[in-house]
Amino acid sequence: ARKPASISNSQRAPSAGLLEAEREMADVEDECAACDASIRERMKNVHWVPLESNPEMLTDFAQQVGMPSSWAFTDIFGLDEELLAMVPPGAVAVTLLFDSSRDVMRKWKAEQQAAIQASGQKISPSLKHLRQYVGNACGTIATIHSLANNAEALGLPADSPLGKFLAAADGKTPDEIGIMLADAKDLHTASEASAQGGQTAAPEADADVNNHFIVFVEKDGDIYELDGTKAFPINHGAVEGSLLFTAAKVIKKNFMEKDPDSMHFNMMALVKDD
């Protein structure tokens, strides 16, 4: 098992888990005016096998759906500067795995949402975001967010499974795109195949797990937190220096310092694989 310095690595990167996914589903149902009762009921029963928290698995899935082989996910072994310096330069996305079921994190999530709804925030019109309606798909969604928001830099082919999905999603709301994912057979097949190739035995699709994957990307000079279970993207302000170092500061302040007793934090970066 991987044990990055300063960060405890959960063996499996779930998509908020069955119980967590059901709690989040209740939250998003109220906001999903486009969903009729039958769709809501159907989505409650849609669960994918969760992706494990290791870079090989995310890279495998990403390449199956269109990411060129010149890019890959890599471990971030800690938040100290010397450890961040071990990551190849030019990271275009930073993933975070953490225990989202803890009361302190759920409380912070509600407070953060209320504060943003009261004061507003700037959101880049070019940001790609989808909501999580598929249980245990947060690792898949974090990977999709990573690629979708860097499609041009990555050279994502338009005729790839993800390229076609993004074309079909153009102009749709995050809720609508989240619902589309349940019917995206190519993405589902690739995600399930990747999930079976991890270092640990893959859990059942409806397994009860509490860890959750999110991702940080840069758009128009700002760093955004993309979490399919949140009502909207979170703009954490201007990128200072690099996405990697800025994401590290955001993670320390908004996750590690909020829940100092938790050891369940793991990060990866999407970088050029020269």
Image (cartoon, rainbow, N blue to C red):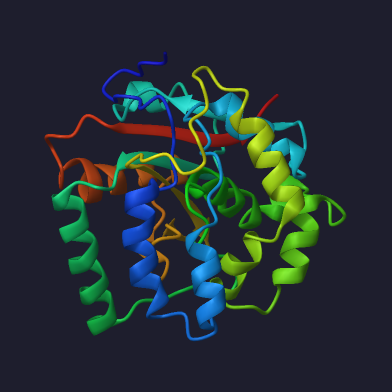
Number of numbered discs on residues? 0
The residue drawn where x is 65% and y is 40% is 191
- Residue nearest the viewer, comparing 27 with 89: 27
Q: Is residue 162 left or right of residue 27?
A: right
- Residue nearest the viewer, comparing 161 with 220: 161
Residue at the outermost bottom position: 33
Could you tell me residue 213's position as x and y percent? 42, 44
The residue drawn where x is 43% and y is 59% is 224
Could you tell me residue 243's position as x and y percent? 46, 46
Residue at the outermost right position: 159
Q: Is residue 124 visible?
A: no
Could you tell me residue 121's position as x and y percent? 35, 77
Q: Relative to 228, does residue 194 appear above or below in the rendering?
A: above
Q: Relative to 73, does residue 232 appear above or below in the rendering?
A: below
Q: Is residue 133 left or right of residue 68?
A: left
Q: Is residue 274 visible?
A: yes
The residue drawn where x is 52% and y is 41% is 205
Q: Quadrant location of residue 266?
A: top left
The residue drawn where x is 39% and y is 41% is 96
Residue at the outermost top position: 1
Q: Is residue 88 left or right of residue 13?
A: right
| Quadrant into which the C terminus falls | top right
| Quadrant into which the N terminus falls | top left
Could you tell me residue 93's position as x and y percent? 52, 45
Q: Relative to 218, does residue 206 appear above or below in the rendering?
A: above
